[in-house]
Amino acid sequence: MHGSPFRRPALACAALAAAWLLPAAPALANAGAAPAPAVRDEAKSPLVSTEWLEKNLAAPKLRIVEVSVDPGIYERGHIPGAHTVAWHTDLVETVSRDIAGPEKFAALARRLGIDRDSTVVLYGDNNNWFAAWGAWVFAQYGLVENVKLLDGGRKKWEAEKRPLDTTTPEVAASTFPVTPAAGTLRARFADVLAVARKEKDERILDIRSPDEFSGKVIAPAGVQELAVRAGHIPGSVNVPWGRAVNPDGTLKPVAELRKLYAEAGIDGSKPVITSCRIGERSSHSWFVLSRVLGYDARNYDGSWTEYGNAVGVPVVNLAGTVWGGK
Amino acid sequence: MKASAAAVPAAALPAGTALRVGLAAALAAGLAGGAWHLSGEAGGGRLALSLVFGALFGFVLQRSRFCFLCLWRDLLDHGDPRGALGVLAALAAGLAGTTVLFGAWLPDPSGTRLPPGAHIGPVGPVLALAGLAFGAGMAVSGSCIGAHLYRLGEGSPTAPFALLGAALGFGLGFATWNPLYLAGVAEAPVAWLPRHLGYGGALVAGLAVLGAIALWLLRRRPLPAAPAPASRDPLHAVFVARWPAWLGGLAVGAIATLATLRVAPLGVTAEIGGRSRQAAASLGLLPERLEGLDGLRGCATALREGLVTPNGLFVGGLVLASLAAALAAGQFRPARPRRGHVLRGLSGGILLGWGAMTGLGCSIGTLLSGIMAGAVSGWVFAAAMLVGATVTLRLGRRLGWLA
């Protein structure tokens, strides 16, 4: 079911990115230092395994939430007891461009029966792409340490032929308080511009495809071009998000991830800002950097659709795709 | 199910019949093999199911001759309500099944959300116009798109031209979409009955309307005296004799429910529309942007990126299973197309295609799947389609153009 892909541009774009990038994996695995096992399944780990989740489905205070890109995929079979969150309505403001406001988020958390002491396991299709974005939104409302991703996401759960369910769980609503979003995990335009102008010594990680980064294209194939300029933010480095993922959908071991980003000059010694086209793919890398590697990372959700449309900002365009008439 | 066609003792049959039944069994085995192969591929489960549901749907359509125009003509011309009652049975069964599903998927229907994938479209004059054109196309070409597909399997001389015309009609629909969207679709309400009446209320209201139409039909048009069954042989009843329309209707309702649960609501125009859109785009005939189109519910025509799509397999399975069923029943009667077939097929097909594009689906995707989902758009399309078909039939006959 997961597989009849390629119907939607978003899916196709993610699949393309993954297909393009995954061949690099074995080389990296060999080149890595002593493979340190990632912290998995322990109380403090930001990841839980499919095996752990299946054993703990009935645990009290555990909320499982699916955040998938493809609508209808949850309804036709999901991890037993999982709730669903629609990324394009539940987690955003639908009129203005912003993450869900405090009232809206609190209403969502109450509906899902989430309290401050709940453990929330997020998972989804596309290697947890939007599940990670969900984790970033949750984190801004103070749900950080207790929010985990299912390692391998929906893909691994299905591949292991673990059971799916079609019933929607009913939980008692929680009393999650309305609190303002913490701004510490979010980079704004001014923050990014300061780095571009070298007024701040931080790192920008651009996780788009190499062709978007170089400015050869403005958006991935099949996706609307929403910026009027091509290229990237000066000073940013390019590590496409899919490179953090194994072919089975799980995240690579911690040592490998450290090496992957260190090769691009991101080693945790300086604060990192993750960026992409609309800020959603980049939250996957934000999760890896911030939650798995413990780096000081913020996600820039304005991303290229904000920066690439801004007037009077410096832009690097390696491909030489310049604006002009025909 | 179809495989049991092979169980007809070939030795007892004339040579021609044995060949037909053998071919039908081979086709059925080919479909089963195709589904088995697909299901073994990574992520192929949904594709395999699409093929199976398409095949089941094609088998049921052919066996019960579930053709909207034929059933409507039986009522109009001969006062025989059985076909119309069959459609009502399909709608009632599918409405009940779909309501049960949606109740589980979206426990609270009162918010702003719609059940995923449900064919619930905007209701306005453009939808009515689409229904009228589609109905007119049915009258001119002799069938709706779904029926042309199963008739392709019966060797109909009109169906290939009607389907070609439908593809052209889709192209025309894309060309006229933007002004129609801005004038009458963008702000048209997307009305979903369970949002206003609750699931129980919408189900009861829907069944009450269907029941009232059935009662009215039965009162006005009593059922003809049942003819003695031609044969008591169950194999004959299943594979040769025409199924009663109510049985076909119940089967359609069941397939619609199961397909909605596992793959998507029934629809036969997504693939035709998607491929037409692709062709028009590559020929440079498509408007630069189709305003709002891909955000609307119904038979999505978003550009195809894979060679094999669920709806393509559904339609392919439908045609092949209908061919197998027609072969087994001795109803595969290919005929050489004459000028009238070509002309009526093409011109009616263009109307069908334009109507299906503009109405975001046809008598299957917008009417059946829409009404089953509790969409007001399904009812509006149905009413407009019947008006379009009736007026065109009457006018065409008066002018001596239609039989």
Image (spheres, coloured by chain):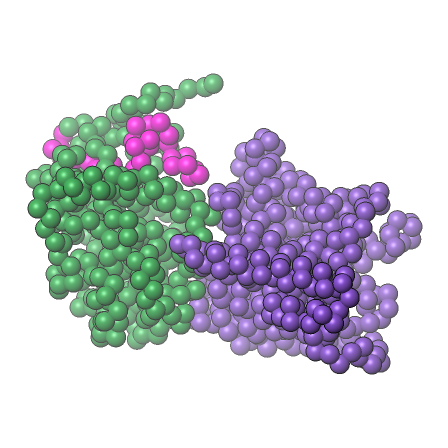
User: Which residue lies at the image location 30% right of the left edge and 72% below the top edge?
Assistant: A173
User: Which residue lies at the image location 34% right of the left edge and 69% below the top edge?
Assistant: A163
Q: Is residue B6 above or below residue A138?
A: below
User: Which residue lies at the image location 23% right of the left edge and 65% below the top edge?
Assistant: A51
Q: Position of residue B147 (x, y in %)?
A: 70, 57
Q: Tell me which corner region of the image, top left, top right, bottom left or bottom right, holds residue B113.
A: bottom left
Task: Report the side of B30 relative to A115 (left or right).
Answer: right
User: Which residue lies at the image location 79% right of the left edge and 44% below the top edge?
Assistant: B342
Q: Position of residue B391 (x, y in %)?
A: 82, 56
Task: Report the side of A305 relative to B394 (left or right).
Answer: left
Q: Quadrant of the N terminus of chain B?
A: bottom right
Chain that appears green: A
> Magenta region: which residues?
A199-226
Q: How many marks?
A: 0
Q: Toward the viewer: B255 or B115?
A: B255
Chain that appears purple: B
